[in-house]
Amino acid sequence: MSHNSIHWFRKGLRLHDNPALLAALEDCRHIYPLFLLDPWYPNNTRIANNRWRFLIEALRDLDSSPKKLNSRLFVVSGPPTEVLPKLFEKWKITRLTFEVDTEPYSQSRDKEVMKLAKEYGVEVIPKISHTLYNIDRIIDKNNCKPPMTYVRFQSVVKAIGPPKKPVPAPTKEDLKGIFLDIMLNEKRLLLEKIDFVFLQAWVCKFEKPQTSPNSLSPSTTVLSPYVRFGCLSARTFWWRLTDVYRGKKHSEPPVSLHGQLLWREFFYTTAVGIPNFNRMEGNPHCVQVDWDNNPEHLAAWREARTGFPFIDAIMTQLRQEGWIHHLARHAVACFLTRGDLWISWEEGQKVFEKLLLDADWSLNAGNWQWLSASAFFHQYFRVYSPIAFGKKTDKYGDYIKKYLPVLRKFPAEYIYEPWKAPLSIQERAGCIVGKDYPRPIVEHEVVHKKNIQRMKAAYAKRSPEDNTITKGVKRKATSILDMFEKKSKR
DNA sequence: TTGGTGTTGTGGGG
DNA sequence: CCCCACAACACCAA
């Protein structure tokens, strides 16, 4: 019982499956659970109110403890490199623990913090628990470069074996004799929800492409924000699913729920292994495209006034609720980029980063590249129709009517294309297109064909060593990865 | 070297 | 209901 420990919460806002927190409690006299409000985030990223609120609630959840334990979570504002040294001295800290975070800013921040800790004689213990695997190990196993397809990724992780089991939450026994400032109040509600909602049959049958982007209540788990902030451990989720699968016939990756966790892991891996992953320029795997600069169109997309009800309804749900179905993300992402507006995926990435509760640096960048056919996905001639796609799962446009009440009186026949309705019908619906609801800002039938040709030209312009022979890309990637490897050898 | 395959397209044809 | 054209890249198996 000799250490004074800080456990620094960043992601991983939970007590269960938190190996770094357990490490902090070992031989510990006093534990200080800490969350820093790092000004780098509001200064360099976009965070809408909904997402702040989710974070605050998650922190409150961590902090909410039975009064009798007199517990608390320390929340301090300021840059980590300024705040932590003060706390090291004030609390006579000998040990700092935290969960490994692979994002570029986090990596540089943690490197600085580790240097400082050394100066103050503080032992640092980082532990992996945000991802299913050690991402570096996946890259190493794949010849020191990130696997570029899901199939390849699957074969690499299969060779590694299943993810590690989650570690248990600290018990009252672990805390005996420790001055604790945190509560052991797990997100019970959430775990109960998993047990309750995840009826076995539903879990076993789950196939992502069969779920609906526009059902009125979500057709998927909606656990992504919890996983994003680490309120729910991906490993805990994985092994709970394994329990549910046991002995039953069940769906398989890529479409199963295990498959969804592997998609997350896939983009975490590529984000670590590919330089400039959230940008087009300097990103060796990203097709270089001459995207248009069109602030009016971008604003119309962002503000749900493209004149395409399906697109506008999705963007409205995004703004109001901070969550939209994965396929809805496909529809609006394709529309913004290669499908209709020909605006850079980086612009869409910024809007999602701000509005999605589950906005995750790696997944956001990876999926935008996928949807814009800039990397990972290359069948750019497969363009989502802003009219036809939604009809498959919502013939009468109930989803549109929910989020765009101005259109609620339109008959099903015209709900996806109100501009085609005769004026008499528009009048009867109490909504004149061009006055009460915008006219479509582009002619989809025309622009999407033109855009396919522009995409074709962008692909053709890639230098031969960029596309035909992968050597060119590999060379670039490995040189970066060599550096990365050296850095990560502990 | 070649041919097949890949989470989630559309519109036209039979 | 299935099949095709549209026609690209990364990877793998033969």
Image (spheres, coloured by chain):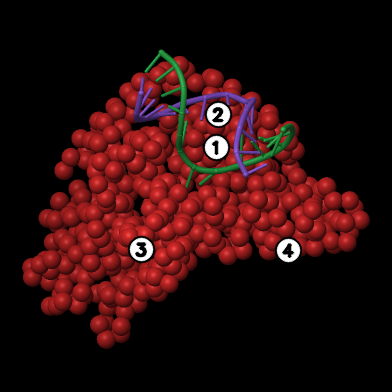
Chain colours: A red, B green, C purple
Image spot of residue A118 (x, y percent): 15, 51
Chain ID of residue with mark 1? A
As drawn, A389 above or below A75: above
Amino acid at dot 3: Val
How far apart are the two marked residues, 2 and 1, measured between alpha carbons? 10 Å
Say what secondary structure mark 1 lies in. Answer: loop
Name the side, left or right, on which A314 lies relative to A155: right
Front one among A204 and A217 = A204
Q: Position of residue A311 (x, y in %)?
A: 66, 50
- The residue labelled by disc 3 is A244
Q: SS at mark 4?
A: helix
Residue mark closest to the camera, 4 vs 3:
3
The three-letter code of the residue at mark 2 reads Val
Q: Please indicate, yes or no, whether residue A444 appears anywhere in the rendered image.
A: yes
Q: Who's the residue at 54% across and 20% down the image?
A: A460
On what subunit does the disc labeled 3 rest?
A
Q: What residue is pinned by disc 2?
A: A289
Mark 3: secondary structure: helix
**Crowding near pointer 4: few (<14 within 10 Å), some, many (20+)?**
few
Residue wearing tag 1: A372
Q: In percent of the image, x 13 and y 66: which residue is there?
A: A26
Residue most extreme to the right:
A424
